[in-house]
Image: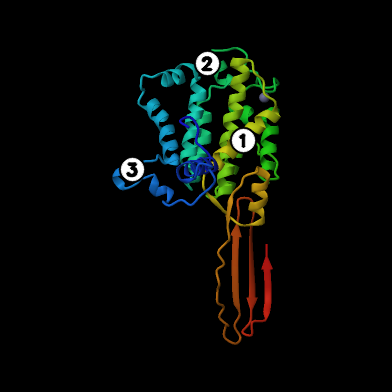
Amino acid sequence: MSCFVLPERVIKELNSKFKIFLWADPDLKKSYNPIKWSFACHSYEEGGLGIKDLENTNVAANLRHIWDLISSKDIIWTSWVKNFMEDEVRDVVKEISKTEFNISESDQIFWKSGATALLKRLKTKSKLCKWGTISDSTCILCGTDEESENHLFHKCQFSSEICKRLLLKMGIVKDLENSWDEEVNWCAQHFSSAKYVGMIKKLTLNSFVYHIWRERNNRVFRNQHGSQDQVSLMIIQDVRFKMLATKYKETDTSNARAFMRRWNIDCSFVIPEIILCTWLYPQRDEVMINTDGSRTDTAGGFGDIIRDHEAEVVAAASG
Ligand SMILES: [Zn+2]
């Protein structure tokens, strides 16, 4: 409990067991709860039963580890992180953590800069070669070209295949851009939605960067090779677990439902709000034009219609 963020459904299940233990008969069958659970979690001084609130306890227990790291507390945990995790991986974990904790922010610049900033810190083989640290700069994922950021996350046959699979998983059909910078810019423009689907796309980009770099490090430092299937699965599972731990809702559209089915995420949907508009007849010999448009992460559209004073359609257009 102090190492993982518990999914919402796990907390619900555990709370249910606690309630049964507290209020049920010896046969442990579900029974009537005389006190609201949130009230039972209040302290004795506040009139509650002093039961620890699982959700808050879980968050506090996990934050405690981060605080120990930041404050350089002299314990085995901080020593282990400092001694056994390579600098690069630690940086990536830090950036990923930032993205996770700021998941509710709608500022697209934040996660985009998170993805690009961590790349700038990665010590790719081409950089180490320039510094004279190593002499062979060949990419360990494909073994055919020099390992640079642009190659590792974009041109590399190993990574680009995974990238294409993830795009399909997100329902996006497109060719890869000319460079990694252009790819990140494309994502910044198309993953900007603050809704649940948009967050999954942003997390996928960050998770992709993390796992490609992790796979590269596993091969370089531990001689462990993962397949494209295994890395793709880890990226998808990472995103799924992070999203299952959140409580966001998505607008109920056929696209959103298809998206969640593809990702196997059990999400709550809300019915879109219908806005009623009134229409005023124009004067005789005048026409009225009504126009509207909308956009999603991957598409957009508009429509307009021109009517005369008797509401007869004079012209219409859409695109
Ligand atoms: Zn490669």
**What amino acid is labelled 1 in the image?**
Gln
Q: Let me know if residue 203 appears in the view.
A: yes
Q: Is residue 206 above or below residue 104?
A: above
Disc 2 designates what residue? 131
Disc 2 from disc 3: Cα separation = 59 Å
**What amino acid is labelled 2 in the image?**
Trp
Q: Quadrant of residue 205?
A: top right
Name the secondary structure under disc 3. loop
| Total marks placed | 3
CB contact under 8 Å: marks 2 and 3: no
Q: Is residue 237 above or below residue 314?
A: above
Counting residues from the N terminus, which is met first, the one under dot 1 or under dot 3? 3
Name the secondary structure under disc 2. loop
Disc 1 from disc 3: Cα separation = 37 Å
Q: Is residue 78 left or right of residue 195?
A: left
Disc 3 designates what residue? 43
Identify the image's colour scheme: rainbow, by chain, secondary structure or one colour: rainbow
Q: Quadrant of residue 63?
A: top left
- Judged by depth in the image, the label closer to the viewer, 2 or 1, is 1
